[in-house]
Amino acid sequence: MALPADYHIHTPLCRHATGEPAEYAAQALKIGLAEIGFSDHSPMQQDDFDDWRMRFGQLDEYVEKVRQAQRDFPQLQIKLGLEVDYLPGQEEWIRSLAERHSWDYLIGSVHYVTDRWAVDNPAQVSNWKGRDPLDIWSTYFERLTRATLSGFFDIIGHPDLPKKFGAFPQPDYAPFIERFLEAAQAKDVAVELNTGGLRKDCHEIYPGPEFIQLMCHRAIPITFGSDAHAPGEVGLNFPEAMQLARQAGYTQYCRFHQRRREPTPLQ
Ligand SMILES: [Zn+2]
Ligand SMILES: [Zn+2]
C-alpha cells in the first residue's frame, strides 16, 4: 500500500513545533512516503498578533529551509506550501503572501473565531466556557466558507477544527457544513483529511466520517495531512485516513505542483 503525500507539516519557525525539515524528510523516507509538503503557519501583518507562528521577517528563511531540504533529499518529492490563517479583512495581506513566493499550494485555515481567539488554542480553552458551541461553530463555518469563496486557497485545512476539545454543538450543524461544501464545490477547492484530530480530545480525523461522505458526494478533491509538529508525526495514521476516504467512495486524492492540481490514484 502506497501512502499518499503528507501536505501538512510544520517547522520550528512557528515556535510550537520541533525538528528541522531534514528530520521530517528523513522520517518520511523511513515510513515509505514518496512525497511531503511543508505548510507552516503563515506570518501575520503584526508580528505580535500571537505567539504561535513565524514572524514576517522569517518567511524567506522558511522558504530557504524547504528549498535546502529539497536539495538534500532528491529521492523525496518535497513541496513548498503554507498554512495561511483566514481572518475577514486580511485579504490584501493574504494576497501579498501568495505573491511572494512560488508556492506549490496554499492551505487556508480558520483558527480565529474572533480577532483574538483561536478555537484550537489550549491556552484559550476557557473561552469555550459559558458559550453556546453552536454560536462558535456557526461563526467558524461562516469564516471557513468565506475563506473558500475568497479564491486564495488550493486546500482548506482541518475543516471541523472546533471539535478539537470535544465541544460539539446541538442541534445539528449540518447546514453549516452544506454551505461550506457548496462553496468548495463552486470554487473547486480541495479539502484536507487531517489526522491531527486523532491525537486530540475529539479522537477523530478532521473532518469526521459523515463529513467526508458529504464531500465525496459533491466530488470535492482531497489531500492528506498529518499536521506534524514533530518528525515522529509525519504520515501518522494515514492508513486510517485512507480507509475513511475509500469507505466514503474516494478513489483519488490530489497533489499540487506550483498551484496546479494533479489527481493521483488512492492505492
Ligand atoms: Zn501549529
Ligand atoms: Zn491549523
Image (cartoon, rainbow, N blue to C red):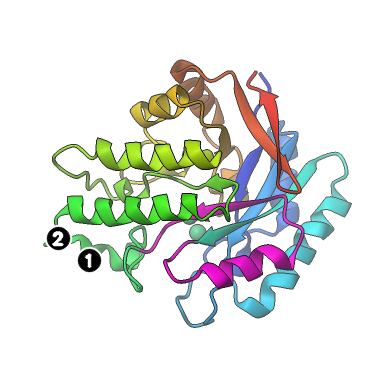
Provide the residue designation for mark 2.
131
Residue type at tag 2: Arg
- Circle 2: is it few (<14), some (14-19), or many (20+) Cα within 10 Å? few
Provide the residue designation for mark 1.
127
Which quarter of the figure has residue 77?
top right
Residue 92 sits inside the magenta stretch: yes
Task: Tell me if residue 15 can be seen.
Answer: no
Q: Secondary structure at mark 1?
A: helix
Identify the residue shown where x is 76% and y is 46%. Answer: 78
Which residues make up the magenta segment?
Answer: 86-112
Q: Position of residue 173 (x, y in %)?
A: 23, 40
Q: In the image shown, does 210 or 6 lie closer to the viewer? A: 210
Residue type at tag 1: Asn
Q: Position of residue 146 (x, y in %)?
A: 42, 55
Q: Which mark is residue 194?
A: none
Q: In the image shown, does 63 or 11 lie closer to the viewer? A: 63
Identify the residue shown where x is 48% and y is 40%. Answer: 184
Identify the residue shown where x is 62% and y is 54%. Answer: 39
- Specify the quadrant that holds the C terminus: top right
Residue 226 sits inside the magenta stretch: no
Query: In the figure, is residue 172 to the left or right of 262?
Result: left
Task: Tell me if residue 262 can be seen.
Answer: yes
- Mark in the foreground, 1 or 2: 2
Q: How far apart are labels 1 and 2 at the CA level?
A: 8 Å
- Specify the quadrant that holds the N terminus: top right
Q: Position of residue 165 (x, y in %)?
A: 28, 50
Residues at marks 1 and 2 touching, judged by CB atoms closer than 8 Å: yes
Which quarter of the figure has residue 69?
bottom right
